[in-house]
Amino acid sequence: MSKNSRPEAGLQSPLLAAETERLCMDDMLKKYCGEFGRWQLRHFVLTSMALALEAFHTMVVIFADREPAWRCVGGGGDCDTCGMDAGTWEWVEGKGSSTVAEFGLICGDKYKVGLVQALFFAGCMIGAGVFGHLSDSRLGRKGSLVIVCILNAIFGCLTALSPTYPVYAALRLLTGFSTGGVGLCAFVLATEPIGPTRRGAAGMSTFYFFSGGIAALTGIAYIFPSWRALYIATSVPSILFLVLVLPFVTESPRWHLVRADVGSAMRTMRSIARSNGQDLPETALLALDEETGQHKCTSTKEAAIITGSLVDVVRTPLTRVRLFLAVAINFFCSVVYYGLSLNVVNLGTNLHLNVFLNAVAEMPAFLLTALLLDTFGRKPLSIGTQWSSSAFCLAGGMMKAYGAWKTVRMVCGILGIFGMAGTYNLLFIYTVELFPTVVRNAALGCATQAAQMGAILAPFVVVMGERVPFLVFGVCGLAGGTLAFLLPETLNRPLYDTMAGMEEGEAQLAARSCGDLEVTGSNPAIRKPDHPPRDSRP
């Protein structure tokens, strides 16, 4: 049989057409290819390495923009740099140790350090929206990831050559623009080829790579104490990732499917099945989850290329509410997560050790959330982690900052960031499952933009005083957990491909749930299907 005569080529005989088994992607993964086998593991690890690069470019300012030690010239006693003439004091490690020393960001210009960080996250906010749309449309997930890695390498190396503060700030803005697309493109590309029952745990595991990147950054910063050398050292890995890793990463079959390229999607699915030691029949054909009157999926070859944008998300009532909730919850979570993270520098110990311990402390939160994800579901876990973080923050805001209470308050901060780190991890997989393929990256990009706005706001909350930041973080956590009550549960639910498929599937699920409750009183969210997957999709 020639290649053009295969079922996916659309030129089959009536007999073959009758024997064709049309399956949506989740059904094909579960029935024939394997939900998380050797192929998905390899693809997941390679793609998730990009999150370590994101950590490099995001957290490098902790070391590059630090305020180094200084001393009075001539062995004087106590002195104040803001009240002394130039030449009467000097930086212990020299001007090249950080941007603060290089550009004189002290005294009245101290605010410029925070401004650079705000500009970076502003760039992330813009980049997340731009590359979220491009990865859903023209460029695809892999194509967008290639572009942002190239831009990160270029902007990162140029940052090391900054002659003045304005140039440095502008290049950090551009680096933020490209970095904003790294996380969402890598996350979606890594998780889309994974089956529904394994997708949650896999998605949660991507953040180990981000925390691992932060931990590795401490070692890089220790080896390269100069801020210019540090920017070069954290940009070179992006080039290595482009050359050594991305050639072995495959474009998402879901993106091929919604672009009406069923041939490429089927080739990827056959590769998955073959690598996992499974057998995918020649008669099996991928289809979108839009259903016909006979409750069967619609073949991609019988439909035009289907695309979507944020306009479609806002126009549809179902996704409009979900987008609003996802944006608000991501904003509140980001304020708490980044705000509590900034308190690490106030411990007064070694900066490298502080950052390393902070990164390591987040990992148990990721593990615990991943273990409980498929037991309690996305919604209860999202509410619980945010409210637990809120409780510790509110408790910390009511305590004094001296004596034994100081230690207790520090513990409250650690437990607060522990809970919010789990939430921050969970929200990515939750947001992915709330929207169909045609708008998934656009919606995730919008939620990421909201998170960047929270990151911009967090430093301003920290400078409010001793108690106020804890109280603000507590209120934000409480608000985020309350809004999560309005989100639907997505545990063991399919990843829809189109807006129409999602609307019809959700409507059928709601109707079936009402019938089940009337007859059996059972929980429809966890009811097992009574028919083969292709006939029982909600």
Image: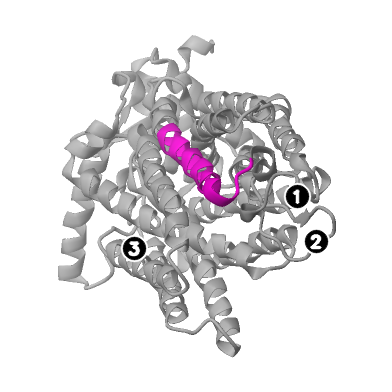
Residue 524 lies in the magenta stretch: no
State if disc 2 and disc 1 touch (CB < 8 Å). yes
Vertical side of 155 occupied by 73: above or below: below
Where is mark 3, residue-wise?
Answer: 480
Residue 458, quarter of picture:
bottom left
> Which residue type does callout 1 highlight?
Thr
Where is mark 1, residue-wise?
Answer: 88
Where is mark 2, residue-wise?
Answer: 76
Could you say where residue 305 lies in the image, as x and y percent from the top left?
A: 32, 20
Could you say where residue 443 lies in the image, as x and y percent from the top left?
A: 35, 40
Q: Is 533 on the left or on the right of 290, as rendered?
A: right
Q: Can you tell which of label 3 and label 2 is closer to the viewer?
A: 2
State if disc 1 and disc 3 touch (CB < 8 Å). no
Q: Which residues are magenta?
A: 104-128
Q: Nearer the viewer, residue 4 or 77?
A: 77
Please rate how many residues cluster around mark 2, counting C-alpha atoms within 10 Å: few if below 14, some from 14 to 19, many from 20: few
